[in-house]
Amino acid sequence: MALQYSIKDLEHLSGIKAHTIRMWEQRYGVLNPNRTASNIRTYTDDDLRMLLNIAVLNRQGMRISKIADMTPEELRGSVQEATNAPDQPEGQVDAMVLSMIDMDEDRFEKVFANASLRAGFEGAMKDVVYPFLDRIGVLWLTGSITPVHEHFMTALIRQKVIAAIDGQYVKSTDSAKKWLLFLPKGEHHELSLLFLHYLLKQRGHKVYYLGPDVPLNAVIQLSKNMDIDVVYSIATSSPSPGELDQFLRRLADAFTGKTLAVSGQRFLEYRGSIPTGMR
C-alpha cells in the first residue's frame, strides 16, 4: 500500500471527518503523524490501522477517552469482538478495509460470513461490500492504494459472487425475461455485472452472461440468433467519452424493439442524447 497518507485519505478510508481526527490527535494522542517541510500531516499504515480500530469502537458508542486508555491487547480484543457481531455493518466495512491493508483473507472471510449471517448474501453485498468499495474508490483513482491491494480484494469478492450465482436455481416463470449482460471492449470492472447476474438469477430470470471486454460487433452478431428481452451493459472506464455516442447508437440500432439499459460512470457523465428505448 501507499507509504504515506494524507488526512483526507484517512477520512475517506475511515469515514471519520478530518477535523475529528485532528481533535483526537491533539486531545488524546491516538495518532502521531509526521509532518512535511510545509507542516502538512502524513500518516503511515500503522496510523490508519489505529484509526480504523478506534472508529469501530467509537461507532458502537465507546467514548474516545476510554479507547485511548486501552492497551494494544485490549484494543485488538474489543475490535475483534465488535467486528464479529452480525449486527454491525459499519464496523464490518472498517474490518473490510483492514483486510485490504493487511491482505488478510481470513479476516475477510469472517467479515463476509458475519455480514451474510445478518442480512443474507444480497444484504452483505449492499450493506458491507458496496460501502467498502465506495469508501476506497476515490483512493484507487488517486493512486493512494496500489493495484495489488485492489486486485486482492476484488478477487475475493468476485469468488463470493460467482459461488452465490452457482448456488442459485430458481425455476423460471412465464413472466421471466431473457437478459443479455456484457461489458464493452476494454472494460474489466466486472463486480457489478456479476452481482446483477446473481440478482436476476435469484429472481427467476434467464441470463446470458458474456462478461467483460466484449467487442460490440460480437454482441450484435450473437443477437441475431438469440431471443433477448433486455440488454444491459455497464461502463466504468471504457468506452472513451469520444466513443460513447457511437457505442450507444450501434447498440440501439442492433436491438430495436428490445429493452436497453446502461449504467456506470461513463454513462453518468454522458451529455449526449440517449437513444429512444434506452434507459
Image (cartoon, rainbow, N blue to C red):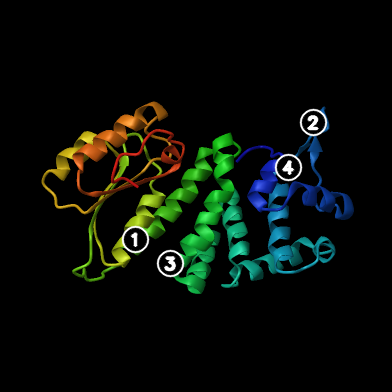
272 or 147: nearer the viewer: 272
Identity, as a three-letter code, of the amino acid under mark 3: Phe
> Where does residue 251 sit, x and y in percent of width and height?
25, 38
Marking on residue 7: 4
Earlier residue among tags 2 and 4: 4
The residue beneath circle 3 is: 121
Q: Residue at x 74, y 69 (%)?
A: 61
Query: Disc 3 and disc 4: Cα gap in Å?
Result: 33 Å
The residue beneath circle 2 is: 36
From the viewer's perspective, is residue 22 above or below residue 60?
above
The residue beneath circle 1 is: 198
Earlier residue among tags 2 and 3: 2
Mark 4: give few (<14), some (14-19) or many (20+) Cα within 10 Å: many
Query: Disc 1 and disc 4: Cα gap in Å?
Result: 37 Å
Describe the element under mark 3 as helix, strand or loop.
helix
Mark 2: give few (<14), some (14-19) or many (20+) Cα within 10 Å: few
Identity, as a three-letter code, of the amino acid under mark 2: Thr
Describe the element under mark 1 as helix, strand or loop.
helix
Left or right: where 275 falls relative to 45? left
Query: Disc 3 and disc 1: Cα gap in Å?
Result: 10 Å
Query: Disc 1 and disc 2: Cα gap in Å?
Result: 48 Å
Please report contact status of discs 3 and 4: CB closer than 8 Å, yes or no. no
The quarter holding residue 121 reads bottom left
Identity, as a three-letter code, of the amino acid under mark 1: Tyr
Q: Residue at x 52, y 50 (%)?
A: 133
Please report contact status of discs 3 and 1: CB closer than 8 Å, yes or no. yes
